[in-house]
Image (cartoon, rainbow, N blue to C red):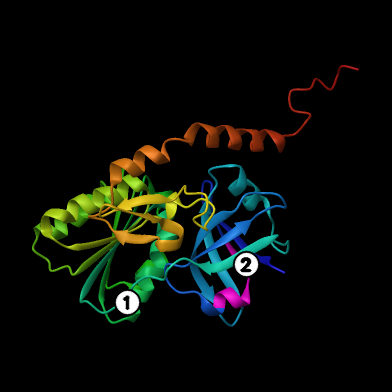
Amino acid sequence: MYEITAKKQLAESIYRISIYAPHIAAKRKAGHFVLIIAREGGERIPLTIASSDIEAGTIDLVFQVVGESTHHLAAIEVGHPVPHVAGPLGSATDVHKVGHVVVVGGGVGLAAALPIAVAMKNAGNTLTSIIGGRAKPLVILEDEFRAVSDSVIITTDDGSYGQKGFVTTALKTILDAGTKIDEVVAVGPMPMMRAVAETTRPFGVKTVVSLNPIMVDGTGMCGGCRVTVGGKTFFACVDGPEFDGHLVDWKELSDRLATYKDMERESYERAKAAHACRLDGVDMDKP
């Protein structure tokens, strides 16, 4: 049985949970994800494994409540079961020693960037981590990144913590300074990863992006994670989720992702309403 052994709210709507899943903990590598069903009859949620503890038999997941399914997952308390967990799935990150690796992460994408950073450092690379968020509360997992990185650069959109600006601004500063970078790995919101790829393109630096935000059912059967890379069609959940950022058709991908935003928002609002107190707005003085 899969059971939540720990739970912590990292920021508004962002949670970190540990799940007892010893067979997954023993096999997972950087880049792998799991499929979770938070309630019977619910949809499958693909989540990248942020870390694992083989001795404890647990995996750590970080997610943001953005729809009905993640709302239900956030409602499960410590000691309670998660109906279904499958994994590890996807292709592991291509980890190798190349020299100087820069891992760029933003928002909740930092959870997927962390295991890549750890693996790249363990492979003997010099590691620079650029981590960012819209504001200080959304810069998560800072301590974990500092523990494995040779240097850490923090950015916030509003300047409330670290450097004011985007992660791409910090990345371009390093590139403009002539610092030798052998590989960049970007994980985060789609616009951020696209911007990172465009920032490194003029410098000819290999850039890998993790397209885990587009995964839906985690099996490739739904076709929702279809992406064109180098003129060929791939499915992020089975062929990736990591691809050459300079070859991704970003416009096609952005157009597809915008298709279901309104429906996702409506589903989330219904889920929140279903959990609201039925006495809200009721005048208790009336018979």
Nearest the eye: 94 or 134: 94
Q: State the image coordinates of residue 253 (x, y, percent, origin top left).
A: 35, 44
Whether 105 is among the magenta residues is no
Q: How many marks?
A: 2
Toward which corner of the image does residue 117 lie, by quadrant?
A: bottom left
Mark 1 belongs to which amino acid? Lys
Is residue 98 shown above or below 76?
A: below
Q: State the image coordinates of residue 61 (x, y, percent, origin top left).
A: 53, 62
Q: Residue at x 42, y 68 (%)?
A: 91
Q: Which mark is residue 121?
A: 1
Toward which corner of the image does residue 268 lie, by quadrant?
A: top right
Graded by Cα atoms within 10 Å as few (under 14), some (14 to 19) or many (20 or more), the crowding at tag 1 reads many
Q: State the image coordinates of residue 194 (x, y, percent, origin top left).
A: 28, 48
Q: Residue at x 60, y 36 (%)?
A: 267
Q: Secondary structure at mark 2?
A: strand
Is residue 72 shown above or below 144?
A: above
Nearest the eye: 28 or 252: 252
Quarter of the rendering occupied by the C terminus: top right
Q: Secondary structure at mark 1?
A: helix
The residue labelled by disc 2 is 19
Q: Residue at x 49, y 70 (%)?
A: 51
Mark 1 / mark 2, whichever is N-terminal: 2
Determine the residue located farthest toward the right in the rendered image: 287
Quarter of the rendering occupied by the N terminus: bottom right
**Residue stretch rendered in magenta on the structure:** 17-25
